[in-house]
Structure formats: C-alpha cells, structure tokens
C-alpha cells in the first residue's frame, strides 16, 4: 500500500513523455521508449468543474496515450503546448451579464455580455438551459455554442431576474 508521501512524490515526477509540434503545427507526443504519436489531442476530464485536473492525451485513432493528473505539475514547455491546444479547441464563453431578452417565450434572442465581449444567442427552448453542479448553468444556443454561467448568484440582479423567467 502506498502512503501519501509516495503519492505526492510520484505526482511531482516528470511525465513519461515529451510534447512538441511538427512542421504542420500538429502536436506530437513521444513516449519514453521513443515512439512518436502525431496529431494527439488533449481532452479535459472535467472541463467545467476541474479544468486543470485530469487531462488525457488522445491519439488520432482515439486511444488514450497518457494521463496528466494535474496540469500545473507539468514542465512549463509541455504545459504551454497543452494550454495552447486546449484554447484553440475549446470555445465556451462565460456569460457575465444578460443585457436583454427579445421575448419570454421561446425561441428568443438574448443579448449577453461574456468574457469575450457582447454577443447575441438564440435560445430554442428552456431545455437548452442545464443546471450543473451548484449554481452553475450551461446554455446551448441554436448554433450549438455552449455558454457558461459559472455562478448564478454572481450575476447582477437584472440578469438573474431575466434568467428566472426561463428556469
């Protein structure tokens, strides 16, 4: 049986792989035995609840090649490559304020202020607003884009009042 000190020591070790980009900009994972896997993709296990915990490095054919328990425990160069790849693949704006709603019946057009600027989205139905853990909401628009409200109670009162009409 392993004790906590052993777990902590193992978690801090350098991973058994290296990462680089090839001339086409694709991510290449090289295992400790020298095998190169081109076109690997990092995938978060818990993208909303724990985005830096549990990242799988997935091959082009869908196999998991490596598991990263904590992103912040990787060497800076590897961490930067993974973060850049994740940023290019993931697009989930976080709603900071609901500016207006066209109608309280669906479908309705919402104007929202996000962490990436102001935009409009079309809400097809109330079922496109999903409650996640705690007071976190995930809103899907008519184009399949997911918007995150990390903490419902952190929204201003007018935004919460508009949102309450759909919950």
Image (tube, rainbow, N blue to C red):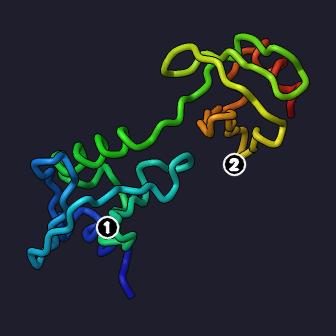
The answer to whether any part of residue 1 appears in the image is yes
Name the image quarter holding residue 107: top right
- Residues at discs 1 and 2 in contact (Cβ within 8 Å): no
**Residue at the spot x=18%, y=59% of the render?**
28
Across and down, in percent, residue 106 comes to 86, 28
Is 13 situated above or below 41?
below
Of pointers 1 and 2, the one earlier in the residue sequence: 1
Discs 1/2, front:
1
| Location of mark 1 (residue) | 59
Q: Secondary structure at mark 1?
A: loop
- Give the left or right position of residue 47, taking residue 109 as reference: left
- Give the left or right position of residue 117, taking residue 86 as reference: right
Across and down, in percent, residue 47 comes to 51, 49
Q: Secondary structure at mark 2?
A: loop
**Residue at the spot x=61%, y=25% of the render?**
95
| Location of mark 2 (residue) | 133
- Give the left or right position of residue 29, taking residue 56 as reference: left
Q: Which label is found at residue 72?
A: none
**Residue at the spot x=18%, y=46% of the render?**
25
What is the C-alpha distance between the residues marked 1 and 2? 30 Å
**Residue at the spot x=46%, y=48% of the render?**
51
């Amino acid at each position: 049986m392993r004790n906590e000190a052993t777990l902590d020591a193992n978690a801090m070790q350098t991973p058994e792989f290296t990462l680089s980009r090839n001339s086409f900009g694709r991510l290449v994972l090289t295992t400790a035995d020298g095998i190169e896997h081109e076109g690997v993709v990092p995938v978060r296990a818990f993208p909303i609840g724990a985005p830096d915990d549990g990242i799988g490095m997935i091959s082009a054919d869908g196999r998991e090649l490596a598991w990263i328990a904590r992103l912040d425990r990787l060497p800076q160069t590897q961490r930067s490559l993974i973060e850049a790849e994740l940023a290019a693949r993931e697009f989930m704006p976080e709603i900071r304020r609901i500016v207006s709603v066209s109608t309280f019946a669906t479908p309705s057009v919402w104007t929202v202020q996000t962490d990436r600027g102001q935009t409009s989205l079309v809400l097809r139905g109330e079922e496109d607003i999903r409650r996640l853990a705690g007071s976190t909401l995930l809103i899907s628009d008519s184009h399949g884009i997911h918007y995150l409200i990390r903490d419902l109670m952190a929204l201003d009162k007018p935004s919460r009042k508009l949102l309450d009409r759909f919950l």
